[in-house]
Image (spheres, rainbow, N blue to C red):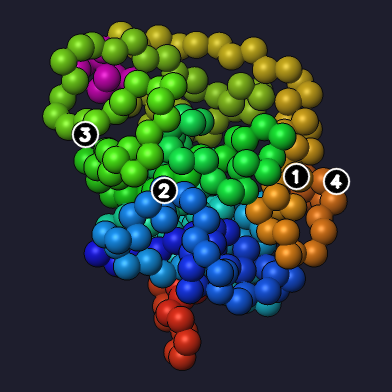
């Protein structure tokens, strides 16, 4: 089954560019441990592209086409796993590798109408870049078109490596036997209000969960006002940990990159000659 590996994860024989011209694109000598590498015998991997050093929540480049959303090419596919999301949403592949420290699985999944679950920290094999951080906030996973496919991936990843400190997952399938207690937020815990369409989607989901018999209630999460600035500063460590060959990035530049305008995402295309690579997403 063909699939794609995000362009910030080394896979033997494929170039890793971290979405930046500052990084050499020669193939790495070895595959770094990740859930993506655990599936190498089952899948035929290719690498997609990522935004520069995956700092942005969109997938855009300087001097190149942005990654466009297959549902509406005037809209963004999100990021930083935007290429994987665009390829899966377009039907090019059923699943594609993604990783998430600050939303890079969840944002593109939301933009492209996919299932994007960030695994709990420690649930899947730790990534090489995450192990370099003082506190590993990065989780590897996939974007897919169904809960069934995401559950199958987690079950397969667990067969490759399981954290002995966490209970086994196994293959989760079919409806749950027990009712759940679900908390929800209508607005961001940082105080940013959601727009009308987002609030309507959350409200509709709450109503559906209640009809299924689950207990759903609003929750409040107390967030220190310094959280946003602290996170952006910490996120500045991420490029240096995942792209040691790239030009140095100062943490103070992270806020500018993080708040860059959302870009639109390009249809999957192939470069002629050499290794096939998708022109969209990371």
Q: How far is mark 1 from mark 3, CA to CA?
A: 35 Å
Q: Sequence-wise, which precedes: disc 1 or disc 2?
A: 2
Q: How far is mark 4 from mark 3, CA to CA?
A: 43 Å
What secondary structure prevails in the magenta region?
A: helix
Secondary element under disc 1, as helix, strand or loop, is: helix
Tag of residue 252: 4
Q: Mark 2 — residue?
A: 35
Secondary element under disc 4, as helix, strand or loop, is: helix
The residue nearer to you, when weighing 273 against 187, is 273
Instruction: Give neighbour class at mark 4: few <14, some 14-19, many 20+ (Cα, 10 Å).
Output: few
Q: Mark 1 — residue?
A: 237
Residue drawn at point x = 42 percent, y = 14 percent: 183
Residue 31 rendering spot, x and y as whole percentages? 49, 61
Q: In this picture, which residue range is highlighted in magenta?
A: 206-214
Q: Sequence-wise, which precedes: disc 1 or disc 3?
A: 3
Residue drawn at point x = 85 percent, y = 46 percent: 252
Please say whether residue 106 is visible from this viewpoint.
no
- Quadrant position of residue 141: top left
Please say whether residue 55 is visible from this viewpoint.
yes
Are circles 1 and 2 on residues that touch, CB within 8 Å?
no
Are circles 2 and 4 on residues that touch, CB within 8 Å?
no
Q: How far is mark 3 from mark 2, CA to CA?
A: 16 Å
Q: Mark 3 — residue?
A: 171
């Amino acid at each position: 089954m063909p699939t794609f590996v995000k362009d910030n994860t080394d896979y033997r024989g494929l170039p890793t560019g971290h979405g930046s011209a500052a990084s050499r694109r020669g193939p790495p000598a070895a595959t770094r441990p990740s859930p993506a590498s655990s599936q190498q015998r089952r899948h035929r991997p290719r690498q997609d592209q990522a935004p520069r050093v995956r700092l942005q929540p969109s997938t855009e480049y300087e001097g190149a086409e942005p990654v466009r959303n297959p549902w509406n090419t005037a809209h963004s596919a999100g990021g930083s796993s935007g290429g994987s999301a665009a390829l899966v949403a377009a039907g090019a592949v059923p699943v594609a590798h993604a990783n998430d420290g600050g939303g890079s699985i969840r944002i593109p999944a939301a933009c492209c109408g996919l299932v994007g679950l960030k695994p709990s920290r420690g649930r899947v094999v730790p990534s090489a870049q995450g192990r370099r951080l003082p506190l590993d906030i990065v989780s590897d996973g996939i974007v897919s078109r169904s809960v069934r496919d995401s559950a199958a991936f987690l079950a397969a990843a667990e067969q490759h490596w399981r954290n002995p400190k966490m209970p086994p997952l196994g293959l989760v399938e079919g409806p749950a036997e027990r009712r759940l207690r679900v908390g929800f937020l209508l607005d961001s815990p940082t105080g940013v209000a959601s727009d009308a369409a987002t609030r309507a989607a959350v409200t509709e989901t709450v109503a559906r969960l209640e009809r299924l018999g689950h207990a759903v209630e609003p929750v409040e999460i107390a967030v220190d006002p310094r959280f946003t600035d602290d996170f952006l500063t910490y996120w500045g460590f991420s490029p240096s940990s995942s792209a040691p060959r790239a030009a140095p990035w100062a943490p103070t530049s992270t806020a500018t990159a993080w708040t860059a305008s959302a870009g639109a995402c390009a249809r999957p295309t192939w470069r002629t000659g050499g290794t096939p690579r998708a022109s969209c997403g990371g």
